[in-house]
């Protein structure tokens, strides 16, 4: 039986999220995002890369000085000078990353497995001697030989490392293989906790993150709105709500501020939040279709998997080409106009014609014009 209690969200919006091509957060934006992540109950925040330079280190120090409840981690290559740079920022937790697939070991590092293993021993030993909490990041772990990963986990266990970050760096896994690999590693070296870091190149980052948790990972990386390299990472809001409603796993994150958080990060990143964005998009609780609108008005559970208020949104009944009488009655009721179903049915042709002409749903003033033009017809009926 896999223990799915005490799942830890390690949000990396301020690190991997900012690595989205063209995205730069100001210090003020970083502080605001960190405060809100902390306020909603995210347990860990990966807050930057000290080796990037003085400005980055200054921003990390400013984050440390906030005194947040969330643990702050920095990202480093498994190199002593970079770990020293992290220590100088005042953090007590680090991720030390090294390439673990044969592809990257041979074609990027120009080394062999033995050299990678030795690098891990030196860097991890150095970090633990300085009482740091250490997550060992396995870059490209999804393409690595699992036998070699076990060897690395054994080193982590022997030197007192705190967890291993299983990275699907290229976003090429599916949830089934993610589950199998994480479950296998958990069984092989149960003393070492597993963290999953998933990318969205094939659109499966959230599914892979949840599969990793179901397989026994206790830590999961997320970014707000799924920001990140290339196609991005697993979205915080999707992972938390997916765990809660698809898996029955609570994370103790306060979800009612998700919309607020998503809008803040969208503004800071200058990346528009799509209206159809899962969980937090402005129109994910908008109902137009006649059958759907009628069903949701009778009982929201008919067509809503969770209450929109859970994520800071509200239900919308919109009127357009596919609307039926129930939706029109409800929409006009919101405008202070009481219609019978027969009245609504009489207005339907005009509503649909206007929606076709404008190629969208109708605004309040357009609905009022239709009502006023149709007033005589309604009176006669």
Image (cartoon, helix red, strand yellow):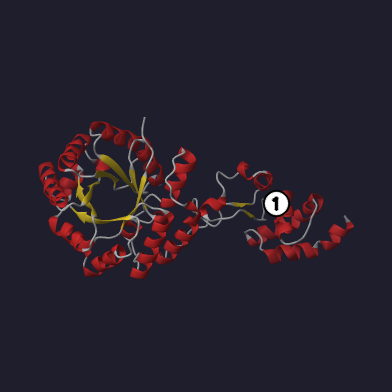
According to the picture, the residue beneath numbered tag 1 turns out to be: 327
Judge from the rendering whether residue 200 lies leftward or rightward of residue 190; answer left or right.
right
Give the residue at x 85% y 59%: 377
250 vs 379, nearest the viewer: 250
**Numbered disc 1: secondary structure:** helix
When asked about the image quadrant of residue 52, the answer is bottom left
Give the residue at x 64% y 58%: 361
Q: Categorize mark 1 by other alpha carbons within 10 Å: few (<14), some (14-19), many (20+).
A: many
Q: Position of residue 224 (x, y in %)?
A: 41, 56
Check the picture and name the quadrant holding the C terminus: bottom right
Judge from the rendering whether residue 87 lies leftward or rightward of residue 247; answer left or right.
left
Give the residue at x 56% y 51%: 308
Check the picture and name the quadrant holding the N terminus: top left
Tell me, yes or no, if residue 174 can be seen here: no
Question: In this picture, is 257 found above or below 168?
Answer: below
Give the residue at x 79% y 64%: 373
Q: Residue furthest right?
A: 380
């Amino acid at each position: 039986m896999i223990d799915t209690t005490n799942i830890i969200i390690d949000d990396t919006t301020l690190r991997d999220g900012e690595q989205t091509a063209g995205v730069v957060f100001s210090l003020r934006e970083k502080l605001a995002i960190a405060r809100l992540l902390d306020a909603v109950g995210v347990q860990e925040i990966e807050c930057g890369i000290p080796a990037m330079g003085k400005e980055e280190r200054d921003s990390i120090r400013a984050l440390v000085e906030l005194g947040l409840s969330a643990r702050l981690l920095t990202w480093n290559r498994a190199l002593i000078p970079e770990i020293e740079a992290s220590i100088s920022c005042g953090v007590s937790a680090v991720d030390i990353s090294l390439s673990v697939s044969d592809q990257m070991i041979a074609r990027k590092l120009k080394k062999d497995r033995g050299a990678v293993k030795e690098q891990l021993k030196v860097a991890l030993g150095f970090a633990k001697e300085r009482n740091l909490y250490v997550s060992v990041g396995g870059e490209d772990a999804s393409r690595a030989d699992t036998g070699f990963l076990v060897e690395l986990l054994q080193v982590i266990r022997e030197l007192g490392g705190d967890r291993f970050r299983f990275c699907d760096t290229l976003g090429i896994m599916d949830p089934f293989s993610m589950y199998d690999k994480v479950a296998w590693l958990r069984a092989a070296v149960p003393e070492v906790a597993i963290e999953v870091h998933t990318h969205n190149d094939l659109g499966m980052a959230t599914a892979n993150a949840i599969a990793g948790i179901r397989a026994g990972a206790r830590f999961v990386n997320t970014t707000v709105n799924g920001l990140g390299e290339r196609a991005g990472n697993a979205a915080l809001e999707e992972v938390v709500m997916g765990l809660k409603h698809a898996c029955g796993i609570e994370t103790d994150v306060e979800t009612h501020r998700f919309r607020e958080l998503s809008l803040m990060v969208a503004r800071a990143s200058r990346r528009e939040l799509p209206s159809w964005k899962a969980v937090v998009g402005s129109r994910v609780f908008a109902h137009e279709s006649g059958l759907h609108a009628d069903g949701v008005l009778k009982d929201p559970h008919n067509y809503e998997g969770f209450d929109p208020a859970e994520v800071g949104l509200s239900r919308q009944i919109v009127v357009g080409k596919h609307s039926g009488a129930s939706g029109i009655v409800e929409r006009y009721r919101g405008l202070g106009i009481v219609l019978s179903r027969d009245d609504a049915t009489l207005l339907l042709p005009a509503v649909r014609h206007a929606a076709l002409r404008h190629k969208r749903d109708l605004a309040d003033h357009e609905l009022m014009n239709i009502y006023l033009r149709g007033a005589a017809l309604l009176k006669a009926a």
